[in-house]
Amino acid sequence: MDADLSSLEDKASLIVGASHWKSRALSEGADTGLVFSDGPHGLRKQEGKEDHLGIAESRSATCFPTASALACSFDPALVERVGAALGKEAKKQHVHVVLGPGVNIKRHPLCGRNFEYYSEDPVVSSVLGSAMVRGLQSAGVAACLKHFAANNQEHARMVSDSVIDERALRELYLAPFERIVHDANPWSVMTAYNRLNGVYCSEHLWLLRDVLRGEWGYDGTIISDWGAMSASVDSVRAGLDLCMPGPRPDHIESITRAVWRGELDEASIDQCVNHLRLLYNRTHQNTHEDGTRRPSRTHQAVAMDQSPQESRADNNSLADDYNEWGITDEENFYRSHADIARLAAAQSAVLLENNGILPINTSNTIAVIGSFARMPRYQGSGSSRINPKFLDNIWYRIEQRGFKATYADGYEPLMGETTEDQLHAAESIAERADVTIVVAGLPDRYESEGFDRKRMIMPHGHVLLIERVCAANPNTIVVLQGGAPMEMPWRKKPAAILLMYLSGCQGGGAAVDILSGDVNPSGKLAETWPERLEDTALGSTYPDMNREVHYRESLYVGYRYYDAVGIEPAYPFGHGLSYTSFLYAGLEASYMAETIDGENPSPTLTVSFDITNTGAAAGSEVAQIYIAPKPGVVPAPCPPQKLVSFTKIPLNPGETHSTRVTLDWVALRHWDSQSQSWKIYPGVYEVRVGASSRDIRLRSNIQVGASTCDNASARLAINTTTAKMNVVGGLDNTEAVSTCAADEIYTLPANGCFRTQKAERAFIELYGRPLPEPKPITPFTIDSTVRDMGVCWLGRRTFRIIDRILAEPSKKLDRIQREMMREMASNMPLRALTTSGVPLSAIEGFVSMLNGHYLTGLIRALRGLVHQRERHERIPTERVP
Ligand code: BGC
């Protein structure tokens, strides 16, 4: 394919960013390239200082509930609506690519970024991730599915190596990406920072070329995470279309030289350019950027009927007033999205406990306690941090409704600490009220992109407050805010617990809608809430401090582990209460083997059942379908059951709905590493229908006949034109893949077994080929981290100098941002300095110096700095004709 551009260098210059958020213009008649912005639950468009950590200001936008909250809605139509609203905001702010959704599996509750991810289960992540992509792209804006793949911890995220056996990789970690590519065709995919089985994802030939493009038939554009690209030529060879951010003159130079030397085929560059052009065309269909734009108006301050002290006006200039979606002015546009955010938050809230106190009698006197009631925890920290246009809170909504209410802080909001005076004040208003609402959870500093949580606990001040208030008034309701599971040793003390997660800019209204009974809660947990950290598969051995992270638990992630080892979680996967009750009846399950006919991925499994609302309130039920193979049917590792589908059904009191779900063969498939194909193992499987993974209401057996689905992934991608590309299997084709002979750890796992040495030995056997070589700290390379440099005196000195340079600017940051920066800086590879404009050759020179070649290294570093400007000048800055 010819990219139709004048010179090799011109073409090479297009496949690296022009700046932090922009690519170069690449099409005839276009005056701009592509504009990117985070993502994933709101827009973070920076127009001044730029960064990928959520530090500098961004334009105001709607902050929707984060993925961990949205997932609990189990409602793809709702998520699609959120995606469409986000897409419209992106369009309005002239953004072409929104960096999201993030569909990485929640491997452990301590991952600092879990709030940005949907679930521990690949089916939930797939269905809701697809919905988000569809919504975004319905507005003509590209989704960027991230982080591909196996990006499951924040510790050392830019250099860690996720070492995963191929079954767990295929069935858990790749599954959401595969399904979303097939079902929703995201126009772009973002490669993760980490290595996967020894190779950086951005240069992973097998992952990008063989699996994503080959097996799944992906035709979209592959973009690196910000600063993820490590080796220029290998990345382009593997199929990375765009290295972000830019400028990276070294990348252009390296690939140009590689073509001259015959080490890289020019056609690879042409392909990247063509993929970028495709992305450009996809995001520029039917838009108003080419002449239909009306002149922009002067900004008017946005009037709000919300609490003025809690809302923020937008100081940015108004976007153009074109009216693509029937919205006549700026305020209504964002207000209608705030309404969607509120609806989404209410539909996603999970009622964990209720002794009947909820919904509250709104004529009662209410004591509202906890700083989060006025200064809500509603989003996470890092690149997804949004500057909300409208921001409400629980106390404001309670006052707005005219409830008879009093308020006490209870604790200090940033650190979550409390004092005897604060506790006293809280107890005293609690004692006098009919009902008490305590708002508590995880403060900002407890979870963030860039580092993992150390423990699963809430601040001591919050726990103390809950216990003291519950003792003062038994009619206490706890409302929880936070992005991930917390230990709740106090959980049997309150009369009710309502989990809001990080519920976005209208979470206050949503919580009050549920507390007051205006909305009947219908959210269910998309991840298990274990009783304590020690109950999790990896306990406090997560995150792994080794650079090579062995995923020893294989498929035993989340409920798959708790079910297998028989641990009772505090709240199981799929749990959530309602103000009404539901009766399940009449399960019929049938399997039609003959529909697997080689080229047709026809439905094979049909499940039907009835649900009746047996209570007095209208409400929705999330019915979940699990498949449980009988022992011995599926080779180990084989968790007892897995979710294969779910459906959310709204029902009026007394109403019955007959549900019929048809599932394709994917529900029953398992990866067979030996034959490198998907297989359906013959035998008896139990079909379970339940209100949660531990509340199974209906069961029925199906008999599955023998059937092997060779090359099945390619058939999943049947709608795409490239589905028939070569399918080359295996993580590393040069290695023989042995049978996954499973140790008993994988056949009969026991509580805590994956933390033992025995598990390490079993994992090596399961992995079935040599483990990736551990990377020694020395000799240093551009992938060495700032922390690694500490082993030599020059590194330590440099570190002290950097520390001193950063001391002044970091004074402007708040504590959480400083903590994030410190953790991220120490785990940052030296090559990441390119994102701050340091030329790669200067970094390479410095690496030589670290390795003891002081003079040659210094000369190289200085030369790199001197030549930087010259190189910049050689890169075309104008549109390529
Ligand atoms: C994050 C991405 C994000 C990008 C741009 C990276 O640090 O991992 O999720 O989209 O920055 O802000």
Image (tube, helix red, strand yellow):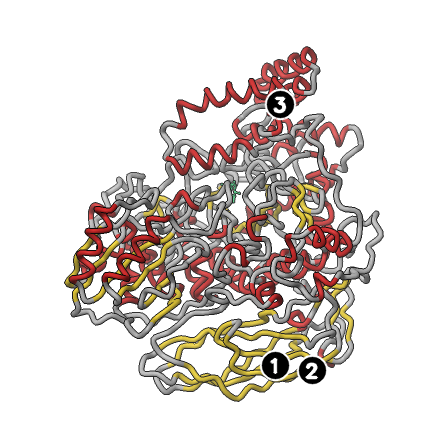
Amino acid type at mark 3: Ile
Q: Residue at x 36, y 41 (%)?
A: 59
Q: Residues within 10 Å of mark 1 (few under 14, many from 20)?
A: some
Amino acid type at mark 1: Thr
Nearest the eye: 574 or 588: 574
Q: Residue at x 29, y 53 (%)?
A: 465
Q: Is residue 12 above or below residue 366?
A: above
The residue that label 2 is drawn on is 592
Q: Tell me the element at label 1.
A: strand
Dot placed on the residue nearer the N-terminal end, 3 or 1:
1
The residue that label 3 is drawn on is 843
Dot placed on the residue nearer the N-terminal end, 2 or 3:
2
Snapshot quadrant of residue 838: top right
x, y percent for residue 553: 65, 56
- Which disc number belongs to residue 606? 1
Q: Is residue 516 above or below residue 588?
A: above
Amino acid type at mark 2: Met
